[in-house]
Amino acid sequence: MEDERLSVRKIVIAGVLSAIAILLGSTRLGFIPVPTPAANATIMHVPAIVGGVLEGWVVGGIVGTIFGLFSFIQAEVPMFKDPLVAILPRIFIGIAAYLGYRGLRRLTGPWMLIFAAMLLGLAGYFAYEVSQTSLWIAILVAVLSLAAVGVLVYLILKGETDVAALAVAAALGTLTNTGLVLSMGVLRGYMAPNVAWVVAVTHGIPEIIVAAIITVAVVVTWKRVETGRGEAKM
């Protein structure tokens, strides 16, 4: 009966989060104004991240697939009328978030700090690559990356490793969405690599920040509610 109850729970949560993703996509609620060249950060992928973190890779994959199907059906741009661009990458949003969250929760404080240092190194390499196209975008990447890693280190030192893991999981889910969609767009000939780099930075960075904030707020609140009911998994 327990397995059946959990199965029903997963189906219900997957359905609710999928409905939220569709609502965000069909209204302007899915776009948050940000002070970057992109003007808006999309949060339509966030339900897939939340689903993966809360209920595992299956729910995350289902919600991501629904998001991709909706994007494909609603597409007006040729690039997103291609299912390999609109649907396939979105399947992995919640899966990546789940794997990242599960893996990072197992790390102790020192290992989390090492991981943060690795992230900073990757950000530096990314900024260097971007600098070949645009210096100001590279500077933006460097500054925001330093700020993000600084917040991550602060959370780790405060003992809030679970919150840090949630933030990184949201970042991984967002990077999966942006990175795979743009990569498929380049491979399928819809955009040039240098254009994809610019889009990745101007859209990806604000979306990572917004996704991390929303994911942490939603998941922490949800788990506190479950703790009150005696159902928390943590």
Image (cartoon, rainbow, N blue to C red):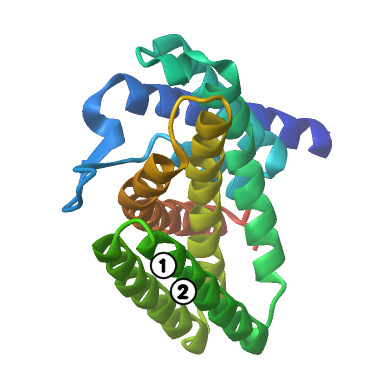
The amino acid beneath tag 2 is: Gly
The amino acid beneath tag 1 is: Ala
Look at the numbered disc 2 and give the secondary structure of its residue.
helix
| Residue at (29% x, 70% y) in the render | 139
Look at the numbered disc 1 and give the secondary structure of its residue.
helix
* Residue 124, numbered circle: 2
Q: CA distance from mark 2 to mark 1?
A: 5 Å
Rendered view: 132 above or below 81 = below
- The picture places residue 68, in percent across and down from the top left corner, at 52, 24
| Residue at (45% x, 80% y) in the render | 155
Q: Which quadrant would residue 134 be assigned to in this image? A: bottom left
**For the residue carrying disc 2, how many other residues have a C-alpha within 10 Å: few (<14), some (14-19), or many (20+)?**
some
Q: Which residue position is annotated with label 1?
A: 127
- The picture places residue 203, in percent across and down from the top left corner, at 33, 46
Rendered view: 33 above or below 87 = below
Q: Which quadrant would residue 227 be assigned to in this image? A: bottom right
Q: CB of mark 2 within 8 Å of CB of mark 1?
A: yes
**For the residue carrying disc 1, how many other residues have a C-alpha within 10 Å: few (<14), some (14-19), or many (20+)?**
many
- The picture places residue 11, in percent across and down from the top left corner, at 65, 27
Locate the N terminus and report the quarter of the image it occupies.
Answer: top right
Q: Is residue 56 left or right of residue 226?
A: right
Rendered view: 156 above or below 231 = below
Q: Is residue 96 left or right of residue 82?
A: right
Q: Which quadrant would residue 19 be assigned to in this image? A: top left
Specify whether residue 12 is in view.
no
For this rendering, which residue is in front, 230 or 70? 70
